[in-house]
């Protein structure tokens, strides 16, 4: 078996759920805000401001839904998002990362459509009200996303948790964010669909795990109380949301924040830059770390088993 098939086999063994993340930019890029979302032609936007990533994604998805087809592929979704962003003067490049080697020509969807399956969502919007670096559109992003997943994909209000710093919802503190990640893991079973949306600041911190990160930095989410409680590193998200997610479940994440390209630390990547032909192994992904976390020795996974379904 060649090295690519070996990589594929080992990641499939180590990660039970299918996890996909759409990010609005690459790790080295910042994610822009939009002062007026009218140009994105959303059906009923919650306000004038919003994130460029969330707004472009919703514009593309609503146009697809209006045709009553829901047949956009992953590559079409990301390519059209890139085109919308470019037309409006944004240079950020959307990308898809995944725990499995997704065929980017498959239809985009959340899963959870089988009998007895539940669709759950955790939506986090942080405007950092009254703080340095205050944002203005993250609450609107969450409200617009919530409307979309309920109206088009059948998510129920009772299965959607919203965290926002607006005094009306549970506060998006580090504790509340991480506790809700843990709750999703605890409640989800095979066949379920989970959707996590984050709109807020993203950051980078010096890698504290001795060279795990290819660029030397961990990507982070920045909760409301980050000054006291700290940022949420990609390692933590992987260890507490991605890794323990139930086998047979589908987890889809939308990260509308700066430096978000690999904030879930997933092994496969597709960049909508116009030159990528499909999903490839992320050369910066640390497979040895992943196997170590799960107590698996590389030699315990045979390289010569049947690989007929790999590619």
Image: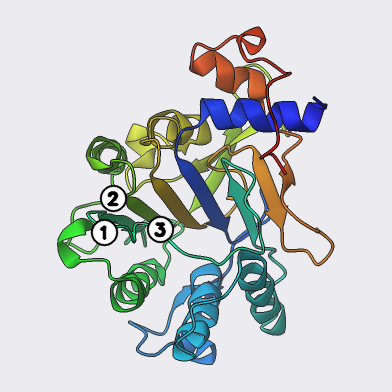
Task: Indicate which disc, 3 or 1, sits on the residue closer to the N terminus.
Answer: 3
Q: Which percent across, then down, holds residue 239?
A: 44, 28
73 up-or-down from 283: above or below: below
Q: Which percent across, then down, holds residue 203?
A: 55, 45
Q: Is residue 208 visible?
A: no
Density class for disc 1 (Cα within 10 Å; few <14, some 14-19, many ≥20) is some
Mark 3 in CB contact with mark 1 (< 8 angstroms) = no
Alpha-carbon span between mark 1 and mark 2? 6 Å
Density class for disc 2 (Cα within 10 Å; few <14, some 14-19, many ≥20) is many
Query: What element does badge 1 sit on?
Result: loop
Density class for disc 3 (Cα within 10 Å; few <14, some 14-19, many ≥20) is many
Alpha-carbon span between mark 3 and mark 1? 30 Å
Mark 1 in CB contact with mark 2 (< 8 angstroms) = yes
Q: Which percent across, then down, holds residue 30?
A: 63, 58
| Relative depth, front residue between 250 and 36 | 250
Which quadrant of the rendered structure holds the C terminus? top right
| Relative depth, front residue between 252 and 201 | 252
Mark 2 in CB contact with mark 3 (< 8 angstroms) = no
13 up-or-down from 252: above or below: above
**Residue 142: assigned label:** none
The residue indicated by pointer 3 is 111
The residue indicated by pointer 1 is 165
The residue indicated by pointer 2 is 172
Q: Is residue 8 left or right of residue 133?
A: right
Q: Which percent across, then down, holds residue 256?
A: 50, 60
Q: Quadrant of residue 270?
A: bottom right
Q: Single out the mark in the foreground, 3 or 1.
A: 3
* Residue at image point 67% right, 33% down: 8
Query: What element does badge 2 sit on?
Result: loop
């Amino acid at each position: 078996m060649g090295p690519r098939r070996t990589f594929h086999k080992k990641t499939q063994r180590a990660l039970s759920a299918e996890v996909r993340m759409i990010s609005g930019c690459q790790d080295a890029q910042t994610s822009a805000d939009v002062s007026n979302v009218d140009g994105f032609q959303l059906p009923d936007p919650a306000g004038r401001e919003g994130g460029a990533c969330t707004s472009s994604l919703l514009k593309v998805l609503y146009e697809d839904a209006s045709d009553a087809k829901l047949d956009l592929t992953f590559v079409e979704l990301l390519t059209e998002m890139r085109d919308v962003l470019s037309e409006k003067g944004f240079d950020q490049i959307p990308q898809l990362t995944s725990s499995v080697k997704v065929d980017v020509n498959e239809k985009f969807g959340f899963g959870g459509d089988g009998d007895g399956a539940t669709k759950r969502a955790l939506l986090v919007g942080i405007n950092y009200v009254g703080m340095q670096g205050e944002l203005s559109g993250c609450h609107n992003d969450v409200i617009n996303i919530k409307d979309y997943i309920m109206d088009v994909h059948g998510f129920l209000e009772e299965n959607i948790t919203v965290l926002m710093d607006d005094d009306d919802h549970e506060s998006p503190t580090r504790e509340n964010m991480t506790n809700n990640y843990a709750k999703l893991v605890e409640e989800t079973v095979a066949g379920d669909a989970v959707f996590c949306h984050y709109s807020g600041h993203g950051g980078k911190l010096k890698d504290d795990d001795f060279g795990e990160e290819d660029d030397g930095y961990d990507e982070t989410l920045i909760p409301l109380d980050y000054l006291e409680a700290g940022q949420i590193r990609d390692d933590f998200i992987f260890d507490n949301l991605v890794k323990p997610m139930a086998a047979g479940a589908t987890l889809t994440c939308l990260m509308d924040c700066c430096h978000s390209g690999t904030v879930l630390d997933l092994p496969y990547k597709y960049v909508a830059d116009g030159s990528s032909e499909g999903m490839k192994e992320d050369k910066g992904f640390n497979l040895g770390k992943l196997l170590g976390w799960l107590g698996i020795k590389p030699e315990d996974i045979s390289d010569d088993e049947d690989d007929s379904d790999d590619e």
